[in-house]
Image: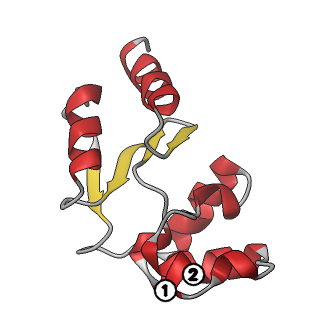
């Protein structure tokens, strides 16, 4: 699978997509206009190991809902991601059986290397 879950209106996602120079066979999913499904999220969890790894603690809603003061379970992380797109750490790049989550320079570089050296 060659897919990127992103937010079309996010300038950081756009910059990363440009940096990655993704091949034409990549599938783009704007998570705001095409919500992530439970099956897609489960597949991402299998690759990432946990729902927490996919969860953005930088989302404004995370602070608004006071979630940092709560003990969240894996089920909570899953439900929040399914409930609102902002809880998915972005972008999420799936390349074959590898997953790259978030926008840290290290993650972006690892994704670029995997995509262009195969």
Visible residue check, residue 23: no
At x 68%, y 62%, the residue is 52
The crowd level at tag 1 (other Cα within 10 Å; few <14, some 14-19, many 20+) is few
Looking at the rendered structure, which numbered label has been put on residue 83?
A: 1
The image shows residue 62, relative to residue 105, as above or below, that is: below
Q: For residue 12, say whether it is visible.
A: yes
Q: Which residue is painted at 48% across and 46% down in the image?
A: 102
Quadrant in which the N terminus appears: top left
Q: Position of residue 41 (x, y in %)?
A: 55, 67
Please give left or right for residue 85 compared with residue 74 in the image.
left
Q: Is residue 65 left or right of residue 76?
A: left
User: Measuring 57% from the left and 37% from the top, which residue is drawn there?
Assistant: 97
Residue 70 in picture, x, y percent from top left:
76, 82
Kindly indicate the quadrant of the structure image that contains residue 99.
top right
Answer above or below: position of 106 versus 68.
above
Q: Position of residue 9 (x, y in %)?
A: 18, 61
Numbered mark located on residue 23 in the image: none
Q: Position of residue 58 (x, y in %)?
A: 51, 63
Give me the residue at 49% from left, 71% from top.
Answer: 87
Q: Does residue 32 appear left or right of residue 64 in this picture?
A: left
Give above or below for 117 relative to 114: above
Comparing 31 with 37, the one in front is: 31
Label 2 – label 1 distance at C-alpha:
5 Å
Q: Nearer the viewer, residue 67 or 27?
A: 67
For mark 2, give the secondary structure.
helix
Q: How many marks?
A: 2
The residue indicated by pointer 2 is: 80
Q: Give the residue furthest to the top.
A: 117
**Which is more toward the observer, 42 or 58?**
58
Q: Are the two marked residues, 2 and 1, in contact with CB atoms closer than 8 angstroms?
A: yes
Image color mode: secondary structure
Q: Residues within 10 Å of mark 2 (few under 14, many from 20)?
A: some
């Amino acid at each position: 699978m060659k897919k990127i879950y992103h937010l079309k209106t996010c300038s950081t996602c756009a910059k990363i997509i440009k940096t990655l120079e993704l091949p034409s066979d990549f599938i783009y999913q704007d998570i705001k206009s095409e919500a992530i499904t439970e099956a897609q999220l489960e597949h991402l969890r299998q690759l990432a190991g946990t729902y927490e790894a996919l969860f953005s603690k930088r989302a404004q809603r995370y602070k608004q809902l006071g979630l940092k003061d709560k003990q969240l379970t894996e089920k909570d992380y899953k439900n929040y991601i399914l409930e609102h797109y902002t809880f998915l750490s972005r972008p999420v790049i799936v390349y074959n059986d590898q997953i790259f989550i978030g926008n840290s320079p290290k993650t972006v570089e690892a994704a670029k290397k995997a995509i262009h050296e195969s």
